[in-house]
Amino acid sequence: MNWIDANGVGLRYDVLGTTGPVLVLIHEMGGTLESWDRVAPELARTRRVVRYDTRGAGLSEKITGEIDLKTMASDLAALLGALGIDEPVAVGGCAVGGAIALRFALDYSERTAAVIVLNPAIDAPGEAGERLISRSHILPEKGMRSIEAASLDTGYPTRFRERDPAHYASFRVRWLGNDPASLGALFRMLARTDLFPELPRIEVPVLGLSGVHDPLRPPAYVRKVLEAIGPHEVIEIDAAHHVPDQAPDLVTRHIGSFLDRVQPVDRRAGT
């Protein structure tokens, strides 16, 4: 793993693969770059895959005060610049990672080749936003375990835990390691976010992957997001909220197939 100071924040990042188009993978709120461990290595066979802990997550610099989605997108732009990546990139993100990917496509359209969103979380109206704000105030005082049941029972239901109990145990402990204050700031960020009015400005190809067992961002919501952009493709997958972790083979296959169409790899040249 590597660390870099970009856009005034210390970010931990990882690059897999040495040739081919660039694919950036952005984890969910509460996740880390390891959220893509089951997907990234296979995609890196033909592409350069960039993963990073977003501001406030994992081993990246923690958040003080408030944060907004534009800053999160500018963090990615600065990271790519620091890595010398100036060509258009495909950007994929899960949940709030999907919102960051879409914000990047809006603010840095010339640097975006395609977008993949998995259970994208791009707004939190009404009671959903109020719950996020309430949890954000509880977290610094009571810690991650105070929201464990509310978060993981829906995001990682029993049927997926039982498929690989040892893996889920590791996932849970990593999730518990979140910085409560930073996650609280991200909760408030999502509560203030609404990307729907801006989505029609996105002109690059977009793929939506939807976990059919996710009660927070179900297939109907994912279709609504993609329909706001324009011509779209939504694929339903046997997963809940943490799609790359719960259905890695399907995610890898669908992302790879999509990118082979919109950003093909010249396998004869190895690029």
Image: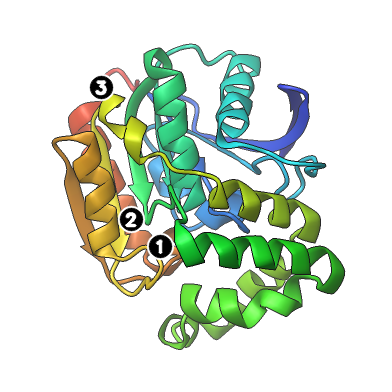
Query: Callout 1 environment at 10 Å: few (<14), some (14 to 19), or many (20+)?
Result: many
The quadrant holding residue 61 is top right
How far apart marks 1 and 2 lie (CA) works out to 7 Å
Position of residue 39 in the picture relative to residue 212 (left or right)? right
**Element carrying mark 3:** loop
Q: Earlier in the sequence, mark 1 or mark 2?
A: 1
Q: Which residue in the structure is indicated by mark 1? A: 243
Residue type at the position of mark 3? Asp
Badge 1 vs badge 2, beta-carbon distance below 8 Å: yes
Q: Which residue is drawn at 83% across and 63% down?
A: 140
Q: Which residue in the structure is indicated by mark 2? A: 251
Position of residue 257 in the picture relative to residue 199 (left or right)? left
Asked whether residue 161 appears in the rendered view, the answer is yes
Residue type at the position of mark 1? Val
Q: Which residue is drawn at 60% across and 15% down?
A: 81
- Residue 243 at what x, y percent from top left? 40, 62
Q: Which residue in the structure is indicated by mark 3? A: 266
Of badges 1 and 2, the one in the foreground is 1
Q: Which residue is drawn at 43% across and 47% down?
A: 122
Q: In which quarter of the image is the N terminus?
A: top right
How far apart marks 2 and 3 lie (CA) works out to 22 Å
Residue type at the position of mark 2? Val
Query: Callout 3 environment at 10 Å: few (<14), some (14 to 19), or many (20+)?
Result: few
- Residue 233 at what x, y percent from top left? 17, 46
- Residue 237 at what x, y percent from top left? 26, 65
Q: Which residue is drawn at 52% across and 43% down?
A: 26
Asked whether residue 177 appears in the rendered view, the answer is no
Q: Relative to the observer, which residue lies in front, 167 or 139?
A: 139
The quadrant holding residue 22 is top left
